Amino acid sequence: MAEFQVVVADPEDGTTYQFDIDGQDANRFIGRDLGEEVDGNAVGLDGYTLELTGGSDNAGRPMRADVAGPNLKALLLTGGVGYEPTVEGERKRVTVRGREVSDETRQINAKIVERGSESVAEALGLDDEDGDDGDDGDD
């Protein structure tokens, strides 16, 4: 059974939210490619739409949008996802995972592209209702 950690970024305010999902909710992501949009109900964001932007597998290998399928592939990279050269012109052979989400995927990165009727904090039940800002005054 698939089990993922989904990291959802909110581009409006720059915050991220992490969710551990499994079972039926995780199956909604299987077979999807990077760049596709999915319903936010899988992570508890009713009415929201998420775009898959990246991820990694169980060994920490990144997913690349330019590699088809869910399989591993060794690429000679000059930069981009999976490799950052330290010297101009430097290249390196790196093993990366394809753009399709599979059972081997461990983390999925997504961003909000369509918003629901309530804020993200309200949808997740994270609102601080008593007005306390977290500062207990013990400075």
Image (spheres, rainbow, N blue to C red):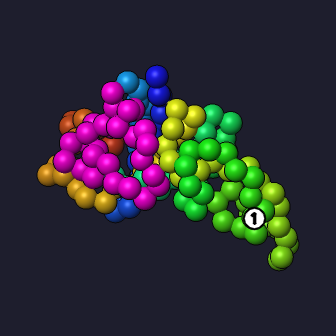
Q: Residues within 10 Å of mark 1 (few under 14, many from 20)?
A: some
The stretch in magenta equals 24-49
User: Would residue 127 be seen by someone viewing this image from the given angle?
Assistant: no
Residue 84: x and y in percent read: 74, 63
Left or right: residue 9 compared with residue 127? right
Residue 49: x and y in percent read: 27, 52
Residue at (19%, 52%) from the top-left corner? 116
User: Would residue 75 be seen by someone viewing this image from the given angle?
Assistant: yes
Relative to the observer, which residue lies in front, 106 or 8?
Answer: 106
Residue at (34%, 62%) from the top-left corner? 12
* Residue 17 included in the magenta stretch of the image: no
Residue 90 lies in quadrant: bottom right
Residue at (35%, 37%) from the top-left corner? 28
Q: Residue furthest left?
A: 117
* Residue 32 included in the magenta stretch of the image: yes
Relative to the observer, which residue lies in front, 63 or 40?
Answer: 63
Q: Which residue is mark 1?
A: 77
Residue at (27%, 46%) from the top-left corner? 39
* Amino acid on which the number 1 mark rests in the picture: Leu
Left or right: residue 42 compared with residue 136? left
- Count every numbered label the image shows and give the total: 1
Residue 2: x and y in percent read: 47, 28
Q: Considering the numbered disc 1 on the image, is that residue within a helix, a strand or a loop?
A: strand
Instruction: State whether residue 18 is above or below residue 52.
Output: above
Residue 56 lies in quadrant: top right
Residue 22: x and y in percent read: 41, 26
Relative to the observer, which residue lies in front, 80 or 15?
Answer: 80
Relative to the observer, which residue lies in front, 8 or 108?
Answer: 108
